[in-house]
Image (tube, rainbow, N blue to C red):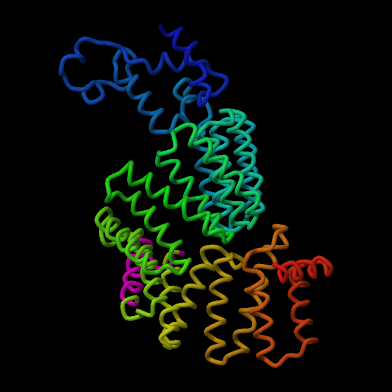
Amino acid sequence: WLARFARDLKPIFGDWLPRQYSPSQILELTKIPYITRFSFGEPLPVLTHSLTDPELPGFYLENVARLIRTDFREAAQIIDPKAPSEQGVEAEIAAVIQRAPIDEVELLRLLREAEQELGESPQVASFLLIAGKALRQHARFTSALPLMRRALSIVEQGYGLDHPAVAAALGNLASLLQDMNRLAEAEPLMRRGLAIDEHLYGADQPAVAIDLNNLAVLLKNTNRLAEAEPLMRRALVIMERNYEPDHPAVAAALGNLASLLHDTNRLLEAEPLMRRALAITERSYGLDHPRVAILLGNLAGLLLDTNRLAEAEPLMRQALAIMEQSYGSDHPLVATSLNNLATLLQNTNRLAEAEPLIRRALAIDEQSYGPDHPDVAIDLNNLAALLQNTNRLAEAEPLTRRHLGIFLSFTHRGGHAHPNLRTAIENYRHLLTAMSLDEEQIRQRFEEIGKEIGIEKEQYRQILDQASEE
């Protein structure tokens, strides 16, 4: 029977067993032997007997547990304890991506070595995705892109075109392209991932609902709100059909739909959905969970837009306290909460209270992401706007200039205009005009930024013209 299992189940083993080993080798080490004294209610062998004696079930149960615990990555070490450990490679990659800034040269070296050692295996695809996600988080999109594409190629070759791992890789690549504002490239990937999951799981499964929501967010970002809404509503129906009414997955779908309704100015429709999502999440996770903080911030933003500032402020302060308690004082989610509260304080003309919050948010994001991240640019713009409102134009100018420089540099590296570039250009021009600079002086200031970034004059003009047209 071992020979038959090895033969008939070979395609399944092929998903995770390194090529140099045969299915029969791992079957020999994971079969559970039948021993009478362990079959009639006696204590478990893994608790009362050896885990290293191949005459006893504990040895084989430990091997099975190790496979599960390591997500099948240590099959080679179970067969041959001297085999190089993939965990070591994974730990090295994790160490590199946790350092700031990420050493891309070292990261790429580790990935090359992993592929040389392990071949085009699912484990290598996993390493590529881990590295790609880390680079994406630090806004190194052009560095992350080939890693994500390589991971997709490996899982397509290893699993075929209609495997769940392929759908997941498509989703990761599409999300990266969305960050790069290459939405036309991202959309077909998302739709393909959705089609795979619908084929595999059926049209009414939670995995499909997640795909629907991701596609809806992309459509929302391309201002196709009328197309996005039915997808979000369908996702909500799927979650409600598969889970109890107070399940966290239902809350997530409610929150997504509420945000879209907020964006389409249907605030009366959005508010009860937000409040229901918040109530479910509080019951599911407790009052001090970060998911609660996010929903509190969303609800506070809606209250802000309906001029209920007195109701919004305590929610924003509660959200900030939860984030600080959950992540410490220097986490990017804390920076988001600080910015939200600062916006409210500015709307109530408490600019002296708002300014230190924005400066703290800027410092957190710079430390977390580096000086050239889009979130840092948003912080710079927020602080510059406050300084302009207090007539400190000379202080605001270098911040607005740096804000524009980040999006110009992003566009120069990525080859596609960042969606915030046009606004950044207009903000800088408006500030320079307010500082009483004439057209020639304004032109010189813009040229200086291009030179600092290293953009050729003709290309720079094309970037500015394209942003103005868009």
Q: Is 187 placed left or right of 82 in the picture?
A: right
Q: Main secondary structure of the magenta part?
A: helix
For this orientation, the residue located farthest to the left is 41
* Residue positioned 40% across, 42% down in the render: 206
Point out the stretch of residues depicted in magenta.
313-332
Residue 380, located in which quarter of the rendered image?
Answer: bottom right
Q: Is residue 178 above or below residue 119?
A: below
Where in the figure is residue 244, as x and y percent of width and height? Answer: 27, 45
Front residue of this view, candidates 212 and 25 = 212
116 vs 454: above or below = above
| The C terminus sits in image quarter | bottom right
How far across and down, in percent of the image, does residue 384 sit? Answer: 57, 81
**Where does residue 286 sit, x and y in percent of width and height?**
25, 58
Camera-nearest residue between 375 and 369: 375
Q: Nearer the viewer, residue 364 or 192?
A: 192
Residue 440 visible: yes
| Front residue of this view, candidates 150 and 367 | 150
Q: Quadrant of the N terminus?
A: top left
Residue at 53% over, 88% down: 389
Residue under the image location 54 percent in, 34 percent down: 123
Residue 324 appears in view: no
Q: Could you tell me which residue is drawn at 61 percent across and 49 percent down?
A: 186
**Quarter assignment of residue 354:** bottom left
Q: Give percent across and percent down for residue 150.
A: 64, 39
Q: Is residue 330 magenta?
A: yes
